[in-house]
Amino acid sequence: MSARKIIIDTDPGQDDAVAILLALASPEDIDILGITCVAGNVPLALTSKNARIICELAGKIDVPVYAGCAHPLGRALVTAEHVHGKTGLNGPDLPDPKMPLQDGHAVDFIIETLRAQETGTVTLCPLGPLTNIATAFEKAPDIIARVGEIILMGGAYFEVGNITPAAEFNIYVDPQAADIVFKSGAPIVVMPLDVTHKVLVTKARNDAFRALNTPVGTAVAQMTDFFERFDKEKYGSDGAPLHDPCVTAYLIAPQLFSGRQINVEIETASELTMGMTVADWWGVTDRAPNALFIGDVDADGFFALLTERLARL
């Protein structure tokens, strides 16, 4: 089976960085056509810088990186430096990137790539707010039918919210964009907090990264050392959840995950619950299913895969 062609849409973020590293380490499974950056965890200038830092850390300087939307569709930008630090990649001391940003806008790259590739062969992998994806769909509706699948990290149901009582960060930052994407008709797989909170970087798992004794293993251990302080204090958990690598792991080993095909609607009107993913987990409405909503994961299998692949870099 040939490697799956993907576009990673991202706002790095330490967990985004790990997701990108896992993809870069898995060329037999994943063919990264490009990385598109969006404002989210930190502003666009930093997310587009961080994506290149990660590519260089992995020694993969031939991956094209594009800057995209600097602001959500209809709201002021909310960022998460309180979690990820001022740079978004606080923890390791990594050099500024030498590889350039590509000319052109990320949205145009998404459109042009979907039009150029055979219909159904490109998977979109959004790890941050959905601004770039929604903007591409609005600008070029013809590409929606060309998307093979969208596998995204965002939302929550049983875990509710992590940036407000009702909303997960990625969806909350640009709920209008999320609404466009979930109503698009494209096939969607959702990695919500319900599953990402089950892949915790415990001390033993982080020690395994550090024991790789490579620049990548050390950097990943330092990243999780940094951002776990926030989650451990907030949730009283044994470590930080690795949200975004769930997307990459699903591409490689979908058997590690399970979920339900359900209807997911995005709240865009109420400030009280803005950005909530209203997930009909119990099938109590007559709304048609529009997403595979993942609810469980083999965490040990996930970390075994992640550690084995990171060891390659």
Image (cartoon, rainbow, N blue to C red):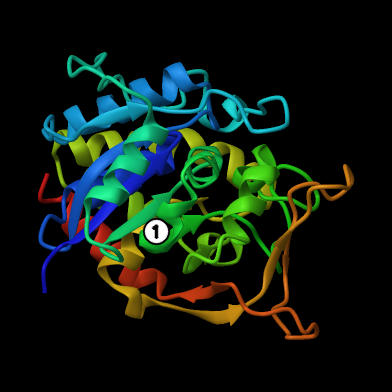
Q: Is residue 218 visible?
A: yes
Which element is circle 1 on?
helix
Q: Is residue 60 left or right of residue 268?
A: left
Q: Quadrant of the C terminus?
A: top left
- Residue under the image location 25 percent in, 22 percent down: 102
Residue closest to the eye, 247 or 301 = 247
Question: What is the quadrant of residue 257 in the picture?
Answer: bottom left
x and y percentages locating residue 307 in the rendered image: 23, 56
Question: What is the quadrant of residue 183 in the picture?
Answer: bottom right
Q: Where 263 sits versus 84, above or below?
A: below
Mark 1 crowdedness (10 Å alpha carbons): few <14, some 14-19, many ≥20: many
Q: Where 104 sits versus 269, above or below?
A: above
Q: Is residue 212 left or right of residue 191?
A: left
Q: Which residue is mark 1?
A: 247
x and y percentages locating residue 92 in the rendered image: 33, 25
Q: Is residue 140 left or right of residue 256?
A: right
Amino acid type of the residue tagged 1 in the rendering = Val
x and y percentages locating residue 119 in the rendered image: 28, 63
- Residue under the image location 46 percent in, 26 percent down: 88
Residue closest to the eye, 146 or 22 = 146
Q: Quadrant of the N terminus?
A: bottom left
